[in-house]
């Protein structure tokens, strides 16, 4: 086997690596190749992790989009009911408000009356 610039020493079996400094270059090339292999492996694993994270984030965004769509539909239905209520008879709404106020008044009156009666029993 003959290499360029090695002459007859290559044919003698030593290949002339030590004479030409070729082994130094070969060792450095091997070292750099291994370093490159390590870096490529790290970049590959990092890109796989990024891909997995992107898939998870896309899934979460899709779920959020569905949640927002359903919430928007619910809000739209509520606004429609409010519009219907505001167009309806104001007298009916006023009547409901008065009945509710009267109910609250009687509940508060009853609570105060019971508390006053208990204070009178404990007092005397």
Image (tube, rainbow, N blue to C red):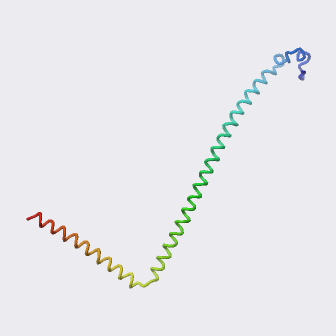
Instruction: Answer left or right for 70 relative to 43.
Output: left
Measured as percent of width and height from the top left, residue 73 is found at: 54, 69
To which quarter of the image does residue 14 belong? top right
Where, by quadrant of the figure, is residue 46 drawn? top right
Q: Residue at (18%, 67%) from the top-left corner? A: 115
Image check: 36 left or right of 122?
right
User: Which residue is located at x 39 percent, y 81 percent?
Assistant: 93
Q: In this view, does 99 lie above or below 19?
A: below
Identity of the residue furthest to the left in this view: 124
At x 76%, y 23%, the residue is 27
Q: Report the residue at 46% width, 76% height from top.
A: 82
The x and y percentages for residue 57 are: 59, 52
x, y (%) of residue 75?
50, 70
Q: Where is residue 55 in the image (x, y as percent from the top left)?
A: 62, 51
Q: Is 115 drawn above or below residue 54 in the view shown? A: below
Residue 114 lies left or right of residue 70; in this view the side is left
Q: What is the residue that sits farthest to the right in this orientation?
A: 8
Q: Compared to 99, does 15 lie above or below?
A: above
Q: In this view, does 48 lie above or below 61?
A: above
98 left or right of 82 in image: left
């Amino acid at each position: 086997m003959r290499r360029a610039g090695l002459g007859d020493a290559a044919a003698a079996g030593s290949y002339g690596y030590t004479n030409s400094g070729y082994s130094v270059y070969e060792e450095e090339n091997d070292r750099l190749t291994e370093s490159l292999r390590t870096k490529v492996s790290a970049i590959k694993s990092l890109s796989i992790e990024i891909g997995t994270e992107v898939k998870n984030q896309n899934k979460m965004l899709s779920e959020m989009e569905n949640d927002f769509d359903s919430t928007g539909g619910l809000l739209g239905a509520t606004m429609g009911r409010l519009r219907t209520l505001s167009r309806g008879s104001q007298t009916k709404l006023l009547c409901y408000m008065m009945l509710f106020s009267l109910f609250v008044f009687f509940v508060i009156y009853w609570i105060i009356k019971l508390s006053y009666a208990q204070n009178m029993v404990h007092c005397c």
